[in-house]
Amino acid sequence: MSIPIITFDGPSGSGKGTIAIMLAKKLNYLYLDSGALYRSVALKIYNEYGDVENKGLDYEKIIESMNIEFRYDSKNDIKIFIDKKECTKQIRDENIASLASKIAKIIRVRESIEKFQKNYVNPPGLVADGRDLGSIVFKNAQIKFFLTASIEKRAERRLKQLKDSGISANLPDLKNKLLERDEMDMNRSISPLVKPTDAIEIDTTKLNIIEVFEKVSMEVNNKLNK
Ligand code: C5P
């Protein structure tokens, strides 16, 4: 039997990461934050080469020789390690997110990250979130969700997340940065952010986390127990 995969796609701040982690913990599945992969690659290239969009860079080699790990700490929170060094806070910076969107347009980068994502699939199952998981990377996923929310709500949520992790930001600036990223992610020629045709769409603007999780859990129970 194939390993079950559940995907969550959507723009930044739609709630997909929070809900995907909750679901992975409930089902005891592995969790893959694909945005963290793009952010980690952007951080490494920025730190080592400065310019992330340089045709001379051997992206495949850089990504294949990188060691990216997701480790759970004592509070069961996920920490990201790049080449054995913790980078959880650095990759959350909105400037790194913008660089991630820039490298996310490069086909060689996407192909190398796609390999990493596919190798991550292991029993008993995987919950993964990103932009192109249900549409491209895991086309055959058993269950696909597409989460959306208004730009105001998404910026508010992102501001809270950043503040909670000790990163300073302001709402108007953050809103502009999210809109810029939406624009890049939705209009790029390869793997743009789109709703997979067979995905369940949830607008989370007026819902709290518990309400979204209830809706998601109901769909998952129905589909996995069929
Ligand atoms: O989800 P997160 O905000 O961490 O993603 C950072 C950026 O990485 C996105 O804005 C997008 O450009 C890129 N990304 C992507 N495909 C994915 C996940 C993230 O292009 N599957």
Image: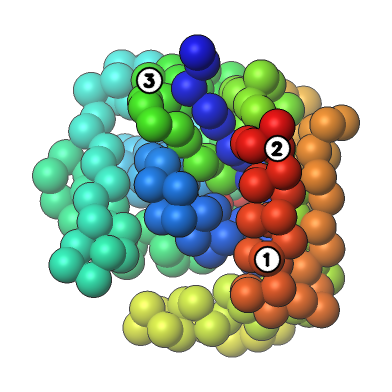
Neighbours of disc 3 within 10 Å: few (<14), some (14-19), many (20+):
few
Neighbours of disc 2 within 10 Å: few (<14), some (14-19), many (20+):
few
Q: Tag 2, which secondary structure?
A: helix
Residue 119, numbered label: 3
Sequence-wise, the earlier of marks 2 and 1 is 1
Instruction: In this rendered view, identify the residue nearer to me: 144 or 123.
Output: 123
Q: Given the image, on which type of amino acid does mark 2 rest?
A: Lys
Q: Tag 1, which secondary structure?
A: helix
Sequence-wise, the earlier of marks 3 and 2 is 3
Q: Quadrant of residue 26?
A: bottom left
Instruction: In this rendered view, identify the residue nearer to me: 219 or 161.
Output: 219
Give the residue displayed 83% in from the left and 31% down from the top: 198
- Which residue is disc 2 drawn over? 223
| The C terminus - image quarter | top right
Residue 214, numbered label: 1
Q: Residue furthest right?
A: 197
Give the residue displayed 41% in from the left and 55% down from the top: 25
Is 71 above or below relative to 73?
above
**Protein image colouring:** rainbow
Sequence-wise, the earlier of marks 3 and 1 is 3
Q: Nearer the viewer, mark 3 or mark 1?
A: 1
